[in-house]
Amino acid sequence: MMKRVLLVGAVIVLLASCGGNDAPKIQDVANNTIELVLEIDKGEGFAGRLQAALITAKPGSTIAMPEGTYTFSDGLSLDVQGVTLKGAGADKTFLDFAGQKGAGEGLLVTAGDVTLRDFTIRDTAGDGIKSKGADNITYRDLTVEWSGEPSEDSGAYGVYPVESTNILIDGVTVRGASDAGIYVGQSSQIIVRNSVAEYNVAGIEIENSTYADVYGNTARHNAGGILIFDLPNLPIMGGHSTRVFNNSIHDNNTRNFAPPGNIVATVPSGTGVLIMANENIHVFGNNFANNRTVQIAISAYLEKFDDDNYNPLPRNIVIRENAYSGGGDDPQGLMSVLAAGLGGKLPELVWDGVTTWDVFTAGDGELTEDGGVVKDVNLVIHENDDIGFVSLGLGSYPLDPRKIRPSLDRPNGTAKKEPAPIKLAHDFNSKE
Amino acid sequence: MRAYPWFCFLFLLTACDKSGPNMQMILADKPAPSLADYNLFTDMHADTPSDRVFAYDLVNPLFTDYATKRRYVYVPKGQSAQYNATDALDFPVGTVLIKTFGYAPDMRTPNINSYKVETRLLIHKKDGWLAAPYVWNEAQTEAKYAPIGKRLHIQTVAPAGNKLDFSYAVPNANQCKTCHQSGHDVLPIGPKARNLNHNDQLQNWQTQGLLSGLVENLPKVPETHNTSFPLNVRARAYLDINCAHCHKPDGSASNSGLMLEWGETDQTRLGVGKRPTAAGRGAGGLLTVITPGKPDTSILAFRMQSAEPGIDMPELGRTLVHDEGVALIREWITEMPIEDK
């Protein structure tokens, strides 16, 4: 009885707030829970009705967008907790931002417990969908894309959750981003799975984040497939504990079309996975093919920095039981310079061999002549014997190609305990 | 149940009190449909403030496409804002901050044939601040609540004499929050002590009972256009009012790591030699936010000089380039000492 009263009350509120244009309906959805669904009418004024619904939505309600293509001149935003925004399908409901005049992204979410699903956002001026400080968010079965050839004029990130906890990205496709297609930054407890990232500069990027599982994805035709980074001078640093497994990472040979200055602009076209300055990263069971520069690269942060709290070295990295074919036959960018001394080709696995940093003095370790500290990177490589490895033996950055001291000996590290699988309370589709 | 008659009685009292702002409306869950419903002004044109609604101004305003701004504050009778040295003054529940945006056919003479485009309210409800935009009709007789914002075609002449023809954006209610966000709260931006501190305004507020707890040594930012102040503090004052509402540790742009508040002292956080984060094409192919001595290779100047969505900064609140602001920041970067790093 109480429940019914509450629902009726909610309906009245919706009616009152939306002027009756969008008839609210109570639908008995498949899982037998009653939820409030507000369907947005098609036709003239859709953008305004949708934004109005996103502002006046009650927590826990669903906003449904019908099949069709809708144009927007300004960014959308959602700041109501627990709202589901859904379309009729990523191949049926298109939100077109080609004429966008303002805002930094197509859709901005700043509330928790939000689900975004079953629609396509395309041609935004800046990022596609950004969620900031939005915990327990789900991006499911949706597409973000920039049409036409990959271009530096496209927006930076496709889906862009940042400064959030409990992020689920499932069944998402991102195409054409001039930075990372699927980007998770400064966040914790993350799942990225069953998604496709293609024709972006970076397919999937986990940056300055902790506890991420990236699995069952396809990263193809990007400049770099999957990047695990930690960068200095950011509010949240010290990324660690990420597992990258059972992904298909192939043909990431698209030119790097990122605007210079952005960190991904330094990623050579043809990179499968790049781990840079992060800790306790496990890469296993993936299928690597035809990444022309290198299948997996492990490196320190490349640039000068001024940040006492930052560790630029990769640490405790485990690479095991992946499948490899082709690749490394046509190194690009900086890697082509470094490969010159190796006959112009690179093996499947490349480590820069950097173990110290001129300005890096934190922690214990052996002091170098110039005051740096040598750190044990602790690389563990458990792959078939025919899988090639090289340490470029660069020692320290700033990078000096003359300091290259290649070694084909596999490192003899000790595997750090693999992080437990990420479990998210709002992940209803979890098979575990 | 017993409280019910009392509630009715109070309701009647407030509803019938026509002399001042309508506290019932101010504290209601939802914004009123029309600006007039609040009784903040005694006339339909919102030119004559009601009792206890005071006009005020800021040392430096945020740039909003050369629009004029008229600001008023209402603090409920018997209450006052508490002084705060760094953040916005701590206004009591029931406070309304009112800002009306207007244009004239020629902004060199902004008072001739001026007209209002929108009035934004920031209302301190019981559970926090609520932002509500109101858009004026052409007859200038009513401003209606516009939660989804609006695009307005504006043609005018800039203070420098150049013609302007552009699409002015009234922000939607969520966009209001984007700039006014401070952690999980919505807070005022302009009325900080340092930005109210001129022409004895803070002292007058205290005399009028709007403010309490004033201290002796009050902070103050210089006028950005007043060249009798050093360039560095003028530039920092400009960044403080135009950028720092997002570029602060608990602001909307916190994840960029670029912090532009008045009190920031860390040069890297201020952008000097700092690499872009999540800037995409907004970086313009440039490597650092500020390259001392070189505004042309500084992302900060590049984004201020742009009017293109996805590149321009601030992301919200402006369509035009603020030529005077760009000139100030470029000069600041040009004169910045070049350190050996």
Image (tube, grey):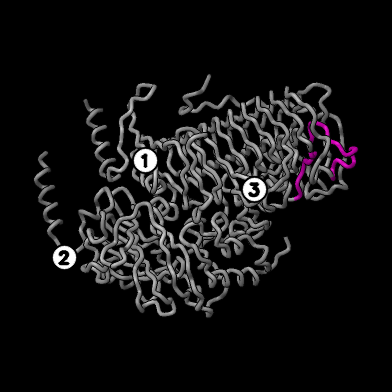
- Name the spot of residue B301 as percent of width and height, x first: 60, 64
Asked if badges 3 and 1 are on one and the same chain, I answer: yes
Q: Amino acid at mark 1?
A: Asp
Q: Which residue is mark 1?
A: A41
Q: Label 2: chain?
A: B
Percent across and percent down for residue A372 are 77, 47
On the question of residue A166 being in view, the answer is no
Q: Disc 3 to disc 1, how far (Cα)?
A: 47 Å
Residue at the disc numbered 3: A232
Circle 1 sits in a helix, a strand or a loop, which is it?
A: loop
Q: Are marks 2 and 3 in contact (CB under 8 Å)?
A: no
Residue depicted at 58% across the width and 29% down the height: A193
Residue type of the residue flagged with mark 3: Pro
- Side of B105 where A225 appears, left or right: right
The kind of residue on which mark 2 rests is Ser
Q: What chain does badge 3 belong to?
A: A
> Compared with residue B249, is residue A131 higher up or lower down, i.e. above or below?
above
Element marked by disc 3: loop
Q: Residue at x 73, y 34 (%)?
A: A251
The residue where tag 2 is placed is: B19
Q: CA distance from mark 1 to mark 2?
A: 43 Å
- Mark 2: few/some/many CA within 10 Å (<14, 14-19, 20+): few
Q: Is residue B316 magenta?
A: no
Left or right: B188 with respect to B208?
right
Q: Is residue A293 visible?
A: yes
* Residue at the image point whose x is 40% and y is 75% from the top: B105
Instruction: Return the x and y of residue B41 as percentages of the image width and height.
Output: 23, 66
Residue B51 occupies which quadrant of the picture? bottom left
